[in-house]
Image: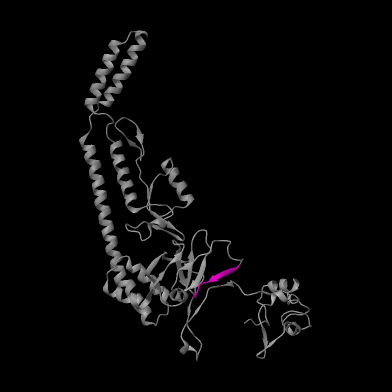
């Protein structure tokens, strides 16, 4: 701070480099000490739920909200360092200063004396003082000292990075791998945790033979094509809904790793309705997954894509899977409040709402007969658990009870 430059000016020569965002209070504290605004070089990768240092090789650099690239930031630092060195040099060489002095003298001779002599004398004296400062020779020791400091700092930075990578490799071998092995031996007590530990270890020992073998026991490969492309895919443990989402990739992708076990999958793209499925559904998808623009589907409804659904009912496994066409379904169960709107709109007296055959005890019955038995406890139209055509108090958001849908 407060470096005295050869031309007599005093300036700050600080280069803040950030690898994480600072709190507003910390920024204000730094700026109060610097006496100005922080204009540093950021090494921050920012994405949804992510705020970490940049890596030299990013998997999905286009997802960085700051649009920063590691090699660009390195270049900015080097240029800033160069600018610091240049600013500490004399702004004009001795030869240029001598040439400038001659030009000043020649122009003084050619001019007519339009001002009085005392003022002219003062102007010449001022110019001579400026030329003397500009002619001040560069001190080799100062430049050498600056270059030496930068060189030592560069070597120190390289050694620090080397030591850090070595430490992380040892940490992955001695800490992460044993933890993953223990989770596998415990019959996958926490499959998603084993996957996260392996993902961390993969950053430092990507080609490790033991890690490659463990990947086969804790992950599975999936492929996904969406229409349109460019959707981001996230996952988290199904039994831990409070966990944050972890990003798997951007569609289309092929043979990308996801954890073994039952996981929640979220597929999102700006301007389109978010799709929430499970990892089992993702494995069963064979066709392109269609994304619906926001506002196209009816409220609180989702599209179930067509797929081959296996028979998971005891005794019917022998029939194998069957393809089920795509359809829309309510995101939530029908609540008492929702069904009350149907009753109030005379849904039981409008035959056009009942478009499918109604059966009882295996036999089809008429609509008129069905309406006589769709009664609540008090004989009014409504579910069996209601009274006088109304649900119990305080149960407006409960699922409708006493109604079977086929």
Could you tell me residue 192's position as x and y percent? 42, 74
Q: Which colour scheme is used?
A: one colour
Can you tell which quarter of the image residue 140 is in?
top left
Q: Residue 139: x, y in percent?
A: 22, 33
Pick whichever, 246 or 360, lies toward us.
360
Viewer-proximal residue among 330 and 78: 330
Image spot of residue 350 (x, y percent):
74, 75
**Which image quarter is the C terminus in?**
bottom right
Can residue 123 be seen in the rendering of this structure?
yes
Asked if the stretch drawn in magenta spans residue 203, the answer is: no
Q: Residue at x 34, y 74 (%)?
A: 215
* Relative to 258, 85 lies left or right: left
Is residue 303 within the magenta segment?
A: yes
Q: Give the range drawn in magenta.
A: 300-306
For the point 27% across and 69% down, the residue is 207
Quarter of the image with the N terminus in it: top left
Quarter holding residue 257: bottom left
**Looking at the image, which residue is at 24% across and 25% down?**
96
Relative horizontal placement of residue 69, taking residue 276 as reference (left or right): left
Q: How many labels does the image show?
A: 0
The answer to whether 369 appears left or right of 234 in the picture is right
The image shows residue 287 at horizontal and vertical percentages of: 44, 71
């Amino acid at each position: 701070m407060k470096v005295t430059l050869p031309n007599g000016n005093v300036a700050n020569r600080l280069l803040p480099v950030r690898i994480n965002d600072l709190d507003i209070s910390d920024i204000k504290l730094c700026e109060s000490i610097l006496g100005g605004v922080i204009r540093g070089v950021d090494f921050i990768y920012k994405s949804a739920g992510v705020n970490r240092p940049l890596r030299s090789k990013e998997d999905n650099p286009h997802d960085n909200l700051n649009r920063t690239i590691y090699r660009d930031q390195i270049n900015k630092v080097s240029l800033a360092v160069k600018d610091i060195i240049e600013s500490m040099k004399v702004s004009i060489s001795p030869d240029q200063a001598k040439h400038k002095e001659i030009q000043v003298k020649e122009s003084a001779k050619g001019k007519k004396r339009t001002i009085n002599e005392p003022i002219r004398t003062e102007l010449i004296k001022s110019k001579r003082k400026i030329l003397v400062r500009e002619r001040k020779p560069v001190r080799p020791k100062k430049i050498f000292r600056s270059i030496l400091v930068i060189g030592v700092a560069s070597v120190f930075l390289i050694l620090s990075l080397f030591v850090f990578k070595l430490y992380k490799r040892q940490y992955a071998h001695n800490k992460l791998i044993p933890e993953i092995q223990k989770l596998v031996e415990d019959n996958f007590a926490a499959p998603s945790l084993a996957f996260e530990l392996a993902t961390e270890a993969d950053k430092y020992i990507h080609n490790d033979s033991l890690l490659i073998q463990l990947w086969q026991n804790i992950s599975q490969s999936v492929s996904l094509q969406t229409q349109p492309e460019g959707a981001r895919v996230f996952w988290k443990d199904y039994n831990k809904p409070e966990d944050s989402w972890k990003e798997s990739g951007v569609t289309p992708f092929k043979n990308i790793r996801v954890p073994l076990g039952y996981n929640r999958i979220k597929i999102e793209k700006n301007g389109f309705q978010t799709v929430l499925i499970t990892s089992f559904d993702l494995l069963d998808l064979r066709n392109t997954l269609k994304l619906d623009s926001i506002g196209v589907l009816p409220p609180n409804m989702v599209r179930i894509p067509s797929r081959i659904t296996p028979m998971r009912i005891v005794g019917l496994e022998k029939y194998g899977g069957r393809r089920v066409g795509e359809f829309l379904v309510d995101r939530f169960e029908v609540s008492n409040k929702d069904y009350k709107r149907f009753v109030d709109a005379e849904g039981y007296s409008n035959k056009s709402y009942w478009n499918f055959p109604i059966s009882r005890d295996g036999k089809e019955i008429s609509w008129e007969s069905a309406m006589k038995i769709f009664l609540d406890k008090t004989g009014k139209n409504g579910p069996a658990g209601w009274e006088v055509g109304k649900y119990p108090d305080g149960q407006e958001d409960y699922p409708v009870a006493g109604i079977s849908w086929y």
